[in-house]
């Protein structure tokens, strides 16, 4: 393997090769549609080949039954917040999103059940430029709540049935009676952490990337985050480089289509204003503003 993915280096390696294609995430985008977000454009020639994105035999969609049998008498137990599926769904077609060729849209034969968790497996796909599939190939997501067209999708992703759920830890976390809590994490009555999703979660992940500090979140990789040093922005081109770096980080989020960033020093010369205009899948174009002291 010293010359790449195979002995002659025809995969990714120091002697060239087309590289790899990987999955960034899986997002339900409708009652019977699921998007696989890739980091490169997949091959889609409809040629009947096993490595073509149109081959539906490469996709396995299974609803997850959370039912547990507890000893000693096999008492049926369903964890809080989990839902038992009533039927399965078959994938009937696969195509590339015309507005974003890095996304494969899978269509099912019937509506996915609301709040039911699903597991999607992608067995294999090749990149449009012959990139080899590197996985990961198994993802889980939760079915959307029925709604009216795009508004229904937005409403569904704004609550808990969101593929990008995270622990809610707002800086102004409040108790049930409205009083401010010093603890960033909160518990539900079931003693589970309160979780947040939807657009708020997307904003949180974007802001985290901006202020994380490059390489400081090693769990996400050494290239995660922006090397933001506002007090050193004095040379020509520094602001433009910062804008490019922030935009590149934001575009790595799996539910982001595109991002354009503007960074300006205000008239006082004491504050750096950052504005990111981000096209977020399902939610559309949103603006995220942050301000950083540079004096």
Image: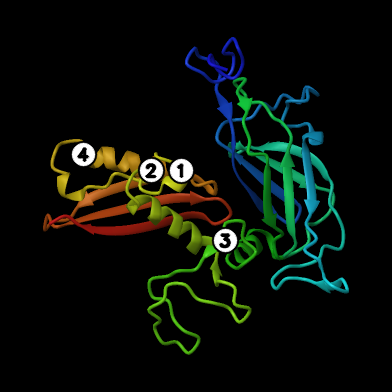
**Label 1 crowding class (10 Å Cα cut-off): few <14, some 14-19, many 20+?**
some
Q: Position of residue 16 (x, y in %)?
A: 50, 14
Q: Quadrant of residue 114?
A: bottom right
Q: Position of residue 191 (x, y in %)?
A: 59, 77
Give the alpha-carbon distance from disc 3 to disc 4, as whole Å: 35 Å
The residue that label 1 is drawn on is: 251
The residue that label 3 is drawn on is: 165
Choose mark 3 or mark 4, whichever is in front. Answer: 3
Label of residue 247 in the image: 2
Quick check: marks 1 and 3 in contact, CB under 8 Å?
A: no
Choose mark 1 or mark 3, whichever is in front. Answer: 3
Give the alpha-carbon distance from disc 2 to disc 1, as whole Å: 6 Å
Quick check: marks 3 and 2 in contact, CB under 8 Å?
A: no
Quick check: marks 4 and 2 in contact, CB under 8 Å?
A: no
Image quarter hosting the N terminus: top right
Q: Quadrant of residue 248?
A: top left
Give the alpha-carbon distance from disc 1 to disc 4, as whole Å: 20 Å
Asked whether 288 or 224 is in front, the reply is 224
- Tell me if residue 179 can be seen: yes
Q: Label 2's element? A: helix
């Amino acid at each position: 393997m010293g010359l790449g993915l195979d002995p002659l280096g025809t995969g990714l390696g120091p002697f060239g090769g087309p590289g790899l294609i990987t999955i960034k995430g899986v997002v339900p985008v409708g009652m019977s549609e699921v998007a696989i977000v890739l980091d490169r454009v997949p091959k889609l020639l409809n040629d009947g080949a096993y490595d073509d994105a149109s081959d539906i035999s490469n996709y396995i969609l299974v609803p997850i039954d959370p039912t547990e049998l507890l000893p000693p008498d096999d008492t049926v137990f369903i964890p809080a917040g989990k839902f038992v599926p009533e039927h399965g769904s078959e994938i009937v077609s696969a195509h590339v999103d015309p507005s974003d060729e890095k996304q494969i849209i899978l269509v099912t034969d019937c509506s996915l059940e609301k709040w039911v968790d699903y597991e999607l497996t992608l067995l294999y796909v090749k990149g449009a430029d012959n990139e080899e599939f590197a996985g990961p190939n198994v993802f889980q997501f939760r079915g959307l709540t029925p709604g009216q067209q795009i508004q229904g999708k937005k409403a569904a992703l704004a609550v808990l049935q969101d593929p990008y759920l995270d622990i809610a830890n707002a800086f102004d976390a409040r108790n049930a009676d409205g009083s401010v809590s010093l603890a960033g994490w909160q518990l539900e009555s079931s003693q589970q952490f309160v979780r947040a999703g939807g657009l708020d979660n997307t904003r949180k992940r974007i802001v985290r990337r901006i202020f994380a500090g490059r390489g400081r979140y090693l769990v996400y990789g050494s290239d995660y985050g922006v090397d933001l040093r506002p007090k050193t922005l004095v040379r020509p081109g520094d602001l433009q480089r910062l804008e490019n770096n922030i935009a590149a980080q934001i575009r790595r989020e799996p539910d982001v289509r595109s991002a354009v960033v503007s960074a300006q020093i205000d008239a006082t010369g004491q504050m750096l204003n950052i504005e990111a205009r981000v096209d977020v899948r399902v939610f559309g174009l949103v603006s995220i503003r942050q301000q950083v002291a540079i004096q």
